[in-house]
Image (cartoon, rainbow, N blue to C red):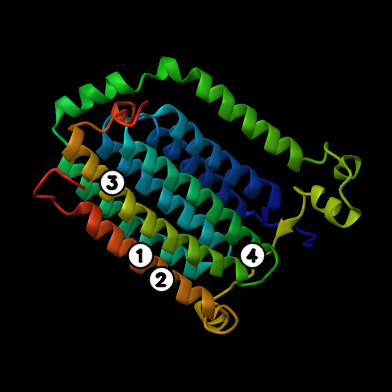
Amino acid sequence: MMTIMAIPTTQILFYIAASVALLSALLTVTRYNAVHALLYLVITMLAISLIFFLLGASFAAALQIIVYAGAIIVLFIFVTMMLHQGDVTIKQESQLFRPGRSIGAGILSLILFFETMFLLSPLYDLSEAGVSTAVSQVSVIGTKTIGVNVIGAKEIGLTLFGPYLLLVEIAALLLLTALIGAFHLGRRHQEDTI
Amino acid sequence: MITEGSLFFFSIALFCIGIFGVLVRRNLLFILISIEIMLNAVAVLFVAASSIHNNSDGQIMYLLILTLAASEVAVGLGLVIQMYRRSKTLDVDQLSSMKG
């Protein structure tokens, strides 16, 4: 597209944000202390929000911070504070999770990762797997660059309350179900029966 | 300019980290956190597709994923609290009362 490449600031920002997100996600799943893990999870969410912003999805970026970092993480932290007993919990957790024993799971996840990357790479020809040619065009992925298509809140609102009105109803029903379920599950039972 | 491939790479890597967490951890709270990471990886993919095709449908799906994540966390944390009240531990291997 552009003949004279300026400094690809967007690309550099994306790589930094993606590395931060992956690193903090890896730290999240390997911490003993639940509060530390949650703080790393907040960093992951903020980095993903930055990626959304770089993609031109500013509304999604705002929602990521408000709902994930603002509401879901706070819920997690409340529960952790209720159940956390300081050093006893951390000692228990170091009994439950041993990095040395997680090599098998790590190898399995890595196999899954490389397999999916291979399916997406140009090395793999979908037409030889019997997939029709219309689908096989998908396999030449990886070189096309994405321009910043800004999709604002107005466009999303028009689509959401136009053709996707049923989705709003379904989401409302889902939230009501979750509310009732969480209320029932979190209630303290007097007698020891469910 | 962000390439499609790097976005797919990022999303798949994040998803695999989430799978690794679910496989490795035995604490119910950490399993829920790993599921959150996996949901986020899918959300990144939807928003990226929305940006690639210059179409707002992907972001509508992102809104639905957000709603799903919120309800999942509410119910899941209710289960965590109930499990702690009953067995005083969050180790999922202790839940063996239905074992035959």
Circle 2 or circle 4, nearest the eye: 2
The picture places residue B24, in percent across and down from the top left corner, at 43, 27
Secondary element type, mark 2: helix
Query: Mark 4 = which residue?
Result: B51
Q: How far is the residue under mark 4 from the one under mark 3?
A: 37 Å
Using the image, tell me which numbered label, if any, was put on residue A173: 2
Looking at the rendered structure, whether the residues under marks 2 and 1 are on a common chain is answered as yes
The image quadrant where one finds the N terminus of chain A is: bottom right
Residue A5 lies in quadrant: bottom right
Question: Residue A134 location in percent, x, y?
Answer: 87, 57
For this rendering, which residue is in front, A112 or A7?
Answer: A112
Name the residue type under label 1.
Thr
Q: Which residue is denoted by mark 1 in the rendering? A: A177
Q: Give the residue furthest to the left.
A: A190
Real-space Cα distance between discs 3 and 2?
20 Å
Label annotation for residue B79: 3
| Viewer-closest of A129 and A143 | A129
Residue closest to the eye, A6 or B39: B39
Q: Chain of mark 4?
A: B
Q: Secondary structure at mark 1?
A: helix
How far apart are labels 1 and 4 at the CA level? Answer: 32 Å
Please state which amino acid type lies under the numbered disc 4: Ser
B18 versus B52 height, above or below: above
